[in-house]
Image: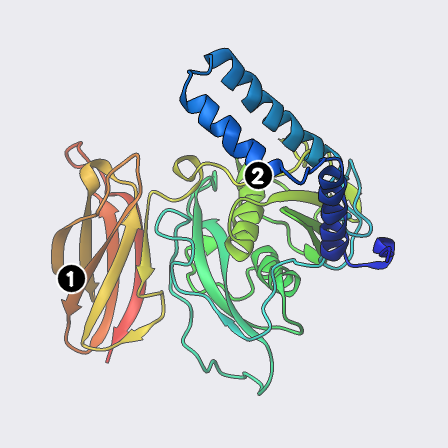
Amino acid sequence: MDTDHDNQPDDARTADLLRRALHTEADRTDVRPDGLTSIRRKIDARRRRRVPAVLLGAAAATVAASLVGVVGCLPPAPQPDPPSGAASAGPAPPGPAPPGAASTSQPTDRPADRDGPVAGPATGRPPTAGAAGQQAGTPVATLPVYYVDAADSGGSRLYREFHRFQLTDTGVVAELRAALGEMLTAARLADPDYRTLWPAGASVATVWTQYDIVGVNITGAGVANLDAAGAAAAVQQLAWTVAGVTGGDPRIRLLLDGEPVDRLWGHIDTGNEITKGAALDTLAMLWLIDPQHGDTVGSTFTVHLAGSVHEATAQLRIRQGGQVVHRQYVTLDAGAPGRGEAFVELSLPPGDYIIEAYEESMVADEAPRHLVDAAITVR
């Protein structure tokens, strides 16, 4: 019976075509009744004489050619069609994530250092579970958001905070909308030392994904009072926030008010896809991952430092009421130009403190370098 393989699933159709090809090749072989006796006689004859190497090579070539012939009878393996709406060039149209895009069907809590110690600086860990105002059954995600130092006029180095979101939907698109919305507005910044470089009034209109491409359409950001360094840092805020949510190294297509932009604010080439810059050139040289600014901790707690400093050596200093109550050297597990981290256990009496981490200058009387701090309460 002939099989109607055109109506079968891809796997079954391929198997059916393979069987047909093999049967066709088998039917071409003439098997004689005395075939086994003839084969044994030939084997005995071969034992009594050496077969020239060239004949063996020719036999191997014949077998290989037969196998190639069998495989050549098969049609090419079917390839998956691109998702609906995919374009071969230019920005992808807004739309839902294609089948197979990363998503979360349950509330997502990312670890404080989801991307590893070299993925990006942080000024805090994810807030604890059970955040105030959480509604039962609402998808919840703790996501990274990138900012710059408010005291740095150039705004060239990025810092990261983790924020907890109640989402209206599950999946990576909902997570991207939440994290990017917070990056644009900085409405819930935990540390007053940080800021966003995106202009006031900017908001996320649409987000879509296609394979490793993320499309972001932002409204209200057509004009920004930034120089080239500030514009580059704003673009990296976007790139690192997207990468922190999706993982990996996504390519980002930026639209403003629904239109592609060749040069963002007249400074940065955004006509092609945007990618995150090298960590050494983009991220803050030193930061406090934990505790986060504003945290309340127990009398014994762990300070988590990370960064890229000379000879992997940083300074940790604790202040209270203008006085230094603790100071020590901290050795990270990697030095510049790499990025390392360290964990330091401290015990302090109850009270309010400022934790500072910095690199000591090699020049006498020069101020500490790359200083970061966090105000905490010890209960």
Q: Quadrant of the N terminus?
A: bottom right
Q: Is residue 223 above or below residue 289?
A: above
**Helix, strand or loop at disc 2?**
helix
Q: Quadrant of the C terminus?
A: bottom left
Q: Residue at x 64, y 50 (%)?
A: 199
Amino acid identity at mark 2:
Leu
Comparing 251 with 145, the one in front is: 251
Where's residue 131, x and y in %?
47, 80
Q: Residue at x 72, y 46 (%)?
A: 18
Q: Residue at x 64, y 54 (%)?
A: 200
Q: Nearer the viewer, mark 1 or mark 2?
A: 2
Comparing 203 with 249, the one in front is: 249
Mark 2 sits on what residue?
A: 36
Comparing 18 with 247, the one in front is: 18
- In the image: residue 32, left or right of residue 233: right
Q: Residue at x 24, y 39 (%)?
A: 335
Mark 1 sits on what residue?
A: 323
Q: Is residue 340 above or below residue 122?
A: above
Q: Which mark is residue 118?
A: none
Amino acid identity at mark 1:
Gln
- In the image: residue 31, left or right of residue 353: right
**Helix, strand or loop at disc 1?**
strand
Q: Would residue 222 be visible to someone looking at this image?
A: no
Comparing 361 with 54, the one in front is: 54
Where's residue 268, x and y in %?
62, 32
- In the image: residue 48, left or right of residue 20: left
Task: Tell me how far mark 1 sits from mark 2, CA to CA.
Answer: 99 Å
Residue 21: image quadrant is top right
